[in-house]
Amino acid sequence: MTVFPLQNFLKTKAVGVRFVHDIINHEKMTSIIQVFLAKSHGHFIDGAWVDGVGAETIKVINPATGGVVSSIHSGGSAEVDLAVAAARRAFDSGIWSKMAPVERARIMFSLADLIERHAGQISQLEALDIGVSRDMMQTIGVQLAADQLRYYAGWVTKINGETITNSRSRSEKREFLTYTEKEPVGVVGQITPWNFPFAMAVQKIAPALAAGCTIVLKPAEDAPLSTMYLADLVAQTDLPAGVFNLVNGYGRKAGAAISVHGDVDKISFTGSTDVGKEIIHAATGNLKRITLELGGKSPVILLKDANLVEAIPAAARAIFFLSGQNCMAGSRLLVHGDIYDQVLSGLKIISEAMTVGADMETTYDIGPLISEQQLTRVMAYIDIGVSEGARLVTGGKRVSGREGFFVEPTIFADCNPDMRIVKEEIFGPVLTVQKFENDDLDEIAALANDNIFGLSASIWTADLARGHKLARRIKSGQVGINVHAAIDPATPFGGYKQSGWGREFGREGLEPYLETKAITAYL
Ligand code: NAD
């Protein structure tokens, strides 16, 4: 059996990601960030930071150490009411929606420039808050965010209706002129998760701002720092007060208050499928428009002719990137029987060579989980995997000698579709591997599609024609051929089945923030 060469792991092409974490240490932390962390953080409403009602706060924890790095006020319906009122005033005044499109675009471009200039500070905050490396953060978190803003700033001057050829002219003596206009939906509530919170926040506000909407955004309570820094950057632009508002708080209080609010016209949510379902119920009162980006259990499919030098490290990256806390994580590896042992052996070598952990002082390959709660959840799933009879190839334990929330890269082989570890989203560094012997594309697709989620998938093969044929059969919003999770601002992103409603990114990501009005004149 060929032993997989480890050095290829770090060399092979990543999806815009270098998988080696950077060194961050406290000495490197800039004074700007130290001052920022020491502040008492309230809510950004109507262009200014305000304290919330009551004294309840939420501790912001560094997951690499378990230590408290900052604290935020825990907002609820009182703060949401204020923020929605500010967003409503700003929307109804037309100060943003009726601003000349070139001017709106200019302001969005200026925010993108500011984000790039503050990449270092944003990356430090994100590193502290979620354990991501500055290196990865700058590549994905910051650059993607700036790209998203610029992409949607480009759309501002191109949001047009169309003229319609109206057939009623045929039966009536007079003529008709029918055309459509695109109008912003109004006040939008945006709720984001803790994995890559900065990029999540920017990818939500960019299309909303382009459409002319005003915003009330609630970041995840586990990782709010970089989004608050974004508010500070917004305050340095010419964006009118009240267009962007931020409320901090727990999901069940602040998030729920936004979802149910009668003056919020649309919700855009990224997070778990269970919470997505709650939001649907909460939003029925005024029939808000809803976009949902939810969970995933994405298959990575290795056909027998896959180039294993590329595919094996890519499969490792697909699951272990951000310690598996990635909605597109390739957590179900489906491997043809002819290459099964070779793939498992390569993955085992890669996983065991990863330097797990590190806080702000060392270089590392895989970081911490976001919280103690997430750690408990992932460890419980590992126990479930063992009790279900899956074969533990490597990992399965907490990383010893670390105070933070670290789990070893874990691989379960010989899994089957009935196992809970195969069916459910774990959101941790746990890979399940299934073997298939069939070459029939319909049967391979059936195995890949045997899941309630449908967010992302990838196919690895030397035969591109077969790759495209299989891609057509996969029920998922994104399918990569010889690449996993290739996101791009212009490429629609979203889920089939219980992975969500609607799309973000691209033109499709703009549409949910627009209403279409049809106007007909009887000439
Ligand atoms: P979560 O659903 O627990 O929380 C997400 C956000 O919703 C947080 O801001 C939280 O405060 C808020 N929230 C919680 N309960 C709420 C309620 N009742 N009403 C309104 N808001 C509420 O998710 P998480 O643990 O932060 O993130 C992990 C999940 O997010 C995973 O399932 C992952 O797959 C998913 N995710 C999906 C995408 C995607 O694009 N499809 C991207 C990233 C993460």
Image (spheres, rainbow, N blue to C red):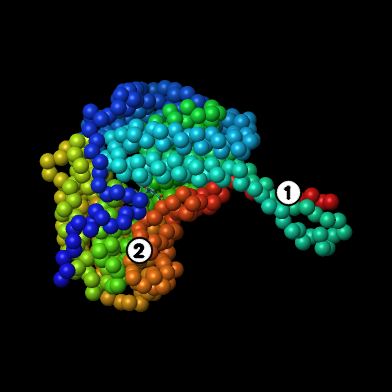
How packed mark 2 is, by other alpha carbons closer than 10 Å (few <14, some 14-19, many 20 or more), is: many
Type of amino acid under label 1: Ile
Which tag, 1 or 2, sits closer to the chain's start?
A: 2
Quadrant of the rendered image containing residue 482: bottom left
Type of amino acid under label 2: Asn
Residue at 43 percent across and 42 percent down: it is 145
Quadrant of the rendered image containing residue 228: top left
Q: Is residue 31 visible?
A: yes
Residue at 71 percent across and 53 percent down: it is 163
Residue ID for mark 2: 482
Q: Position of residue 294 (x, y in %)?
A: 40, 51
Comparing 310 with 494, the one in front is 310
How packed mark 1 is, by other alpha carbons closer than 10 Å (few <14, some 14-19, many 20 or more), is: few
Q: Position of residue 339 (x, y in %)?
A: 23, 71
From the viewer's perspective, tell me whether residue 454 is left or right of residue 28. right
Q: Position of residue 430 (x, y in %)?
A: 24, 55
From the viewer's perspective, tell me whether residue 365 is left or right of residue 190. left
Residue ID for mark 1: 519
Describe the element under mark 2 as helix, strand or loop.
Answer: loop
Residue at 39 percent across and 46 percent down: it is 271
